[in-house]
Image: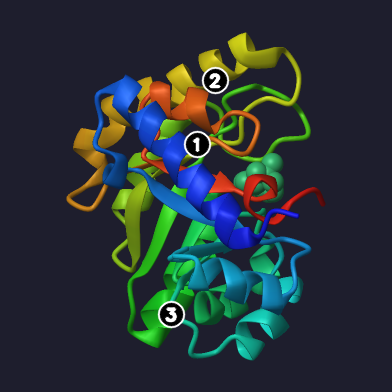
Amino acid sequence: MQTIADNVRLLRERIAAAAERAGAAPESVSLVAAAKTRTPAEIRAAVEAGIEIVGENRVQEAEPKIAELAGLDCAWHMVGHLQRNKAGKALRLFDLLQSLDSRRLADELQKRAAAAGKIFPVLVEVNTSGEETKYGVSPEEAPDFVAYVASRANLGLEGLMTVGPLAGGPEAARAAFRTLRRLFEKTAPTGGASFRYLSMGMTEDFELAIEEGSNMVRVGRAIFGPR
Ligand SMILES: *Cc1c(COP(=O)(O)O)cnc(C)c1O
């Protein structure tokens, strides 16, 4: 059986090869270990294998895992949809929210971050595939929403995120990633000084995503095995 450490090593090689094809430096691509359904022991093994960022999808699932792994040297990203009534908890638990997708959630986080006297790092999630089951603002709404988030004093806008389409194969994935890449270039001037992450690509499509300009991939199964 392949260990988590073997998987991470292999994944880094595949990321490096894809970055090379894109003309990017391998170390310019951040790797987030998507850890939904994984145990604290599995997450610890991933961090010991060099993972620096761990992603979680649900506040309720993440809370006890983060508590159990207190002191582990990694950052925690919320990558799933965040309900407004969990905003305060998310602010306390996570180092960055990748899935900011509405003004109401932005307002709630802004209010709570201001009260806590901190700046909360966020990415704006864009629904690039138009699939109804997906969260995120539409590509059409994205420029105005980026400007809105960038002007909230206690939100630190650091880039854009998308989840590629489930259907349509590699061509549909490529089209979605291209859409996000173009939006990233278009909105970078309004995004502000720390606008730098283009978070796209998962186990099935991270190489494609990197070829299309991704500099942050979120990978679960290729690290931890099937869910
Ligand atoms: C689960 C998940 C991933 C990783 O998916 P894998 O197919 O396991 O690589 C990435 N991003 C988000 C938002 C996820 O929910």
Distance of mark 2 from mark 1, alpha carbons? 10 Å
**Residue closest to the eye, 42 or 218:** 42
- Residue 5's image quarter? bottom right
Query: In this view of the protein, which residue sits in the foreground, 149 or 79?
Result: 79
Residue of label 2: 176
Residue 47 badge: none
Residue 101 visible here: no
Residues at marks 1 and 3, CA–CA distance in whole angstroms: 24 Å
For residue 27, say whether it is visible: yes
Judging by the rendered image, the residue that carries numbered circle 1 is 200
- Position of 74 with respect to 133 (left or right) is left
**Mark 1 falls on what kind of element?**
loop
Of the residues shown, which amino acid type is indicated by label 3?
A: Asp
The residue sitting at the right extreme is 227
Q: Position of residue 15 (x, y in %)?
A: 43, 37
**Tag nearer the camera, 3 or 2:** 3
Please indicate whether residue 176 sits to the left or right of residue 18 in the image.
right
Dot 1 or dot 3, earlier in sequence: 3
- Per the image, the residue denoted by label 3 is 73
Q: Count residues near mark 2 (Cα–Cα under 10 Å), then give few for <14, some for 14-19, many for 20+.
A: many
State the SS at label 2.
Answer: helix
Instruction: Give the residue type that dot 1 points to.
Output: Met
